[in-house]
Image (cartoon, rainbow, N blue to C red):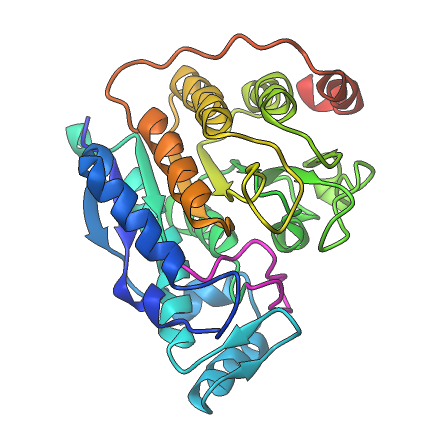
């Protein structure tokens, strides 16, 4: 088994939205924390740029061209929260390309050279970017680009995306709302930006039932988030049997984050990662991690380190023993049809 792999690129530092929570210092804080831990044994690689075809598998040419033209013109606002600079174009290409590279690393190698885990550490994040709209700090939907690439390049029929960012992954939901190719599970504070992600939003047409929204109230912490992963997402994964698990890993549900009211701790992220790692090993599938939000620099760095320490461990990881939270019990009943 090959060492786990971490993809990054210097262009992430060139995306400059000005005074803004989604700042270049996020990358510096992560790099310093990982370097202090010897990069946790992850092999470091630079990401490629996503190709036009890879982006167009998720976004129409009009959106892609609009982002490019605004960056080339010196930058500006896409909306009140989403700002680009001249360096944002290259950063966004590598952020999407990092997700593609994660998929390539996990599915494209052979023999003993296949890592079990790969991570894309880039900015801007992506999970708010809808198919036809950049928004919420996000330009392209990185994790969606990676999931589509897994299907188109490697023929993966089912991908599970777990989004534990405190904000609902409205963009990822939008992209996959009408298909069973992706089982999208999102744990997020409700109510909160972007105002989507109610439990009744379950998909349409062939995708009905394959969007699993797990909204939680303000103040939710380790017990709630951990139970929803272990007692809802894990059983769904066993039933769905994905060929790949992707985590949209945001760290803004942390108790220290300034943009929401979560109470998750560093240990809580390790617990969620342990659930993911254990079920992935049980199913014999790899795990890819794509960075999303997280705006307290210390909490972001520690949360990611806690996640990668568990996912990248060379030793077996036991599933956590957690009590079933009432919210988890309720959502399990709601999605019983998916469990067969």
- The spot of residue 329 in percent (x, y) is 75, 15
> Can the viewer see residue 155?
no
Identify whether 151 is placed above or below 311: below
Whole-percent x and y of residue 102?
Answer: 33, 46
Residue at 29 percent across and 55 percent down: it is 8
- Report the residue at 41% width, 41% height from top: 289
**Percent x, y of residue 255:** 57, 36
- Taking the image as shown, residue 217 lies to the left or right of residue 64, namely right
Relative height, residue 242 to residue 45 (above, below): above
In the figure, is residue 192 to the left or right of 317?
Answer: right
290 vs 315, left or right, is right
Is residue 260 or residue 135 the one in the foreground?
Answer: 260
- Give the quadrant of the N terminus: top left
What is the magenta range? 123-137
Q: Residue at x 61, y 77 (%)?
A: 78
| Residue in front for this viewpoint, 224 or 42 | 224
SS assignment for the magenta stretch, majority = loop
At 44% from the left and 44% from the top, the residue drawn is: 300
Was residue 128 drawn as part of the magenta stretch in this picture?
yes
């Amino acid at each position: 088994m090959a060492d786990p792999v971490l993809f990054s690129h210097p262009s992430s530092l060139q995306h400059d939205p000005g005074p803004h929570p989604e700042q270049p210092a996020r990358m510096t804080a992560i790099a310093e924390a990982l370097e202090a831990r010897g990069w946790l044994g992850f092999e470091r690689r630079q990401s490629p740029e996503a190709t036009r075809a890879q982006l167009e598998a998720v976004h129409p040419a009009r959106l892609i061209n609009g982002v490019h033209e605004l960056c080339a013109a010196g930058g500006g606002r896409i909306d009140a929260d989403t700002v680009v600079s001249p360096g944002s174009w290259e950063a966004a290409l590598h952020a999407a390309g990092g997700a593609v590279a994660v998929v390539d690393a996990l599915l494209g190698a052979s023999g003993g050279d296949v890592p079990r885990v790969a991570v894309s550490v880039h900015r801007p994040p992506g999970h708010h970017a809808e198919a036809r709209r950049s928004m919420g700090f996000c330009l392209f939907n990185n994790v969606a680009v990676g999931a589509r690439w897994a299907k188109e390049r490697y023929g993966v029929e089912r991908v599970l995306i777990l989004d534990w960012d405190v904000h609902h992954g409205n963009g990822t939901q939008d992209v996959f709302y009408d298909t069973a190719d992706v089982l999208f599970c999102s744990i997020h504070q409700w109510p909160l930006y972007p105002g989507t992600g109610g439990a009744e939003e379950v998909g349409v047409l062939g995708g009905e039932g394959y969007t699993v929204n797990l909204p939680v109230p303000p103040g939710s912490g380790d017990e709630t988030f951990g139970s929803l992963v272990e007692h809802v997402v894990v059983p769904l994964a066993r039933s769905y049997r994905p060929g790949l698990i992707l985590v949209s890993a945001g760290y803004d549900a942390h108790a220290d984050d300034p943009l929401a009211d979560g109470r998750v701790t560093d240990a809580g992220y390790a617990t969620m990662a342990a659930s993911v790692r254990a079920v992935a090993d049980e199913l014999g599938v790899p795990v890819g991690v794509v960075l999303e939000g997280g705006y307290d620099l210390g909490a972001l760095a520690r949360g990611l380190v806690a996640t990668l320490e568990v996912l990248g461990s060379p030793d077996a990881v036991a599933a956590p023993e957690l009590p079933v939270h009432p919210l988890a019990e309720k959502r399990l009943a709601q999605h019983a049809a998916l469990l067969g």
